[in-house]
Image (tube, rainbow, N blue to C red):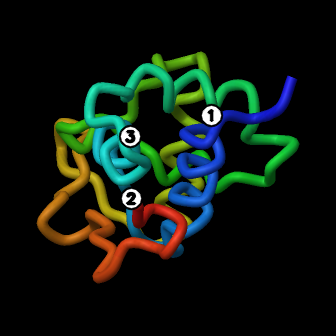
Amino acid sequence: MGKTVFTEKVIEMIKAIPEGKVCSYGRIAALAGNSRGARQVVRILHSSSEKEHLPWQRVVNRDGCISLKKGQGYERQRKLLEIEGIKFDFEGRIDLDTYLWCPIEQPVLLKK
C-alpha cells in the first residue's frame, strides 16, 4: 500500500527540520494539513524513521519535552539533541522560544 499524501507531507516536514532545531508532533501535523494529526505523526515516525532516514530526534511534544520514557529511548534522543547544541533546563525541557523550528514559507507541496 502506498503512502498517503499526509504521510508524504509529514516525512517532508520532518526532513526539513534543521540541525539544532526541534518541532512538535502537532505542529508537524498542522503543517502537513491535519491540525489534529499529532498521533499520526507519532505512528509515521515509528514506522518510517529508519527507512526514510528521518531526523526523528528533532520531534518533541508541545511542551518542549522528549516523549520517550527513560530507559526506552529518552537518553538517546536527548544525547542526539545535545550533540546538535540544544540545551535542556533542569526539568528536561527545551526552550521552544529558542529552538522551535518555524518555516518561513510552507513548501509548494503543501499549497492547494
Can you tell which quarter of the image residue 61 is in?
top left
Mark with earlier residue (3, 1): 3
> Tags 3 and 1 in contact by the CB under 8 Å rule?
no
- Residue 97 placement, left or right of 31: left
Residue in view at x 18 percent, y 38 percent: 63
Mark with earlier residue (2, 3): 2
Can you identify the residue that label 2 sits on?
22
Q: Nearer the viewer, mark 2 or mark 3?
A: 3
Q: Is residue 51 above or below residue 107?
A: above
* Viewer-nearest residue: 91 or 26: 26
- Residue 76 placement, left or right of 34: right
> Tags 2 and 3 in contact by the CB under 8 Å rule?
no
> Tags 1 and 2 in contact by the CB under 8 Å rule?
no
Rendered-image quadrant of the C terminus: bottom left
Residue in view at x 59 percent, y 55 percent: 80
Query: Tag on residue 29?
Result: 3
State the separation of the CA atoms marked 2 and 3. 14 Å
- Element at label 2: loop
